[in-house]
Image (cartoon, rainbow, N blue to C red):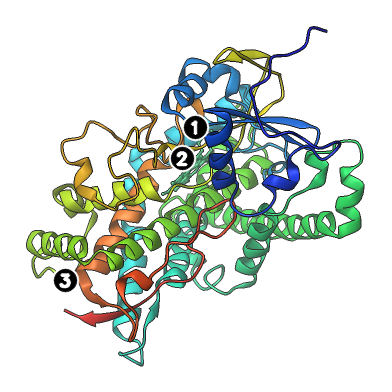
């Protein structure tokens, strides 16, 4: 075989490759440091699996647009396979017929504009309850844990659209289901050696107990989803008889589509779709609002401007509704700027055949990461890149829709996030209502600069230390 001309990268050590350098700290930062030494495309050996990280807009475009068809598959990583019910979903499925069909269902059925009134009322009702809970909390001087609050809000919204309005209380906060999801999230962030050492890694995963934890958690989730599906079948039968009429939630939609003639939807597809929305839609939106509030607390000028806009546009209506959002220009800039500085970790892609990028050979089966975090902080694309300045987006043609490769918070190409509108609406409406309803003060003894922006490691980029602020009635 002719020798491949691989991109440059840190020297791998025998067997392990560079895994020891990637498995600690924050991988996007480590990869960024490598790019300073080795250039915009870096080859990193994860055990026996080759991977590349690119970190310029031109190379991001090459991967996500020009050669998207080569790079639009997902690797069969242990957790992705397990929680997608063996690829029966959108996010983890390898590229192909099945992925195309299910993605179509996401776009045309689950997340279609027809469902907007249902989404709006679900979001508004949960946001109203959250604001009420802050207003009526027993100790009015105590700081509020915004991080905690946002996970609960986002999760209630998502559970409501997936499982239906009756889910509240049953699968709501602190139920056994949430403990299962929390364990699932922890397992998402666990390194499974089987992925990087296909011949013997799985033995170590069983030995360390990681595989057993994964099997147990997946089994419990499976049991839970079976129960949810059975309950939905009963309520669908009642609805057919004109009883128990309610908005169709995601499980209802999947069951209805599954009954259509020629449908290939199985129970596993319903479970895979549930997992995608719960995992893809909860922590991403929650963490974005937390970062937004943290940046605003550090930048009182921006907080004041955003609140003045809200108070003037919404007046004394009492709450911000989704119909107000188009008039909230400055709030939109604040969300854009928050998403620029606080990106989610990319879901890895996998190359489906050998190809060339920037003159280098990229073998088939390479793990591919586009370092969106580095792109959005690059001084050659962004003036004073590390400064939080929403005004930089005024009159800018750059959008979040995957056409401007220095700014791809939702990815780009065939695999771009299908939940953009849903996620954006949740982030906007949550942030808007927090800012509209209260003046926010720092806890006693804390100064603006004391609010850190440290990131927690994991598949969702969370603020490492919870954000505490004191809400005051305006
Ligand atoms: C602020 C909120 C959100 C952010 C920042 C975000 C970000 C992302 C990113 C970066 C990707 C990877 C795209 C790629 O590989 O190029 C992705 C994929 C995905 N997201 Fe989101 N997301 C958000 C909200 C949502 C919501 C609300 C849902 C569902 C209702 C969702 C469902 C998905 C799914 C299913 C995929 C996989 C798409 C595929 O592989 O074809 N996301 N998201």
Q: Residue at x 29, y 54 (%)?
A: 428
Which circle's residue, 1 or 2, is located before the other in the chain? Answer: 1
In the image, which disc is placed on residue 86? none
Is 397 rendered above or below residue 61? below
Label 3 secondary element: loop
Which residue lies most toward the front here? Answer: 37
Q: Is mark 1 within 8 Å of ligand 1?
A: no
Distance Cα–Cα, label 1 vs label 2 = 6 Å
Q: Nearer the viewer, residue 169 or 365?
A: 365
Label 1 secondary element: loop
Is 239 rendered above or below residue 167? above
In this view of the protein, can residue 346 be seen by the observer?
no
Residue 434 image point, x, y percent: 28, 68
Is 258 rendered above or below residue 67? below
Which residue lies most toward the bottom here? Answer: 139
Q: Nearer the viewer, residue 64 or 160?
A: 64
Mark 2 or 3: the one toward you: 2
Disc 2 packing (10 Å; few <14; some 14–19; many ≥20): many
Disc 3 packing (10 Å; few <14; some 14–19; many ≥20): few
Q: Is residue 189 left or right of residue 47?
A: left
Q: Is residue 309 left or right of residue 454?
A: left
Residue identifier under label 3: 318
Residue 317 image point, x, y percent: 12, 68
Residue identifier under label 2: 374
Residue 274 image point, x, y percent: 58, 49
Q: Residue at x 89, y 51 (%)?
A: 204
Disc 1 packing (10 Å; few <14; some 14–19; many ≥20): many
Q: Where is residue 49, by image quadrant?
A: top right
Residue 316 image point, x, y percent: 9, 70
Circles 1 and 2 in contact, beta carbons < 8 Å: yes
In the image, which disc is placed on residue 55? 1
């Amino acid at each position: 075989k002719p020798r491949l001309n691989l991109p440059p990268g840190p020297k791998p050590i025998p067997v392990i490759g560079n895994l020891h350098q990637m498995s600690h700290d924050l991988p996007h930062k480590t990869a960024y440091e490598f790019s300073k030494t080795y250039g915009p495309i870096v080859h990193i050996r994860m055990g026996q699996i080759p991977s590349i990280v690119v970190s310029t807009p031109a190379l991001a475009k090459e991967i996500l647009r020009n050669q998207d068809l080569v790079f639009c598959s997902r690797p069969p990583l242990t957790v992705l396979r397990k929680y997608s019910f063996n690829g029966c979903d959108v996010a983890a499925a390898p590229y192909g017929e099945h992925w195309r069909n299910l993605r179509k269902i996401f776009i045309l059925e689950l997340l279609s504009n027809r469902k907007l009134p249902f989404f709006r009322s679900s979001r508004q009702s949960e946001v109203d309850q959250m604001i009420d809970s802050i207003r009526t909390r027993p100790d009015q001087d105590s700081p509020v844990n915004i991080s905690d609050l946002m996970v609960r809000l986002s999760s209630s919204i998502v559970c409501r659209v997936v499982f239906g309005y009756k889910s509240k209380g049953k699968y709501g906060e602190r139920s056994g289901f949430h403990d299962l999801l929390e364990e699932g999230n922890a397992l998402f962030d666990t390194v499974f050696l089987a992925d990087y050492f296909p011949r013997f890694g799985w033995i170590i995963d069983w030995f360390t107990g990681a595989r057993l934890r994964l099997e147990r958690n997946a089994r419990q989730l499976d049991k839970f989803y079976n129960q949810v599906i059975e309950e939905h079948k009963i309520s669908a039968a009642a609805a057919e008889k004109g009883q128990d009429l309610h908005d169709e939630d995601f499980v209802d939609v999947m069951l209805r589509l599954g009954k259509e003639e020629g449908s290939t939807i199985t129970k596993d597809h319903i479970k895979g779709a549930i997992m995608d929305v719960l995992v893809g839609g909860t922590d991403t939106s929650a963490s974005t609002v937390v970062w937004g509030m943290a940046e605003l607390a550090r930048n009182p000028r921006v907080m004041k401007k955003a609140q003045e806009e809200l108070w003037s546009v919404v007046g004394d209506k009492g709450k911000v509704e989704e119909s107000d959002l188009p008039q909230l220009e400055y709030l939109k800039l604040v969300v854009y700027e928050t998403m620029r500085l606080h990106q989610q970790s990319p879901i890895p892609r996998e190359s489906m055949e050998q190809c060339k990028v920037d003159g280098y050979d990229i073998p088939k089966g390479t793990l591919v990461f586009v370092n969106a975090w580095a792109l959005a902080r690059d001084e050659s694309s962004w003036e004073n890149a590390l400064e939080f300045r929403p005004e930089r987006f005024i009159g800018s043609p750059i959008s979040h829709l995957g056409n401007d490769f220095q700014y791809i918070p939702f990815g780009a190409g065939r695999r771009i996030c299908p939940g953009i509108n849903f996620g954006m609406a949740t982030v906007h409406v949550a942030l808007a209502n927090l800012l509209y309803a209260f003046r926010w003060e720092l806890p006693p003894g804390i100064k603006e600069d004391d609010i850190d922006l440290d990131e927690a490691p994991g598949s969702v980029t969370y603020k490492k230390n919870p954000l505490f602020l004191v809400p005051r009635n305006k």
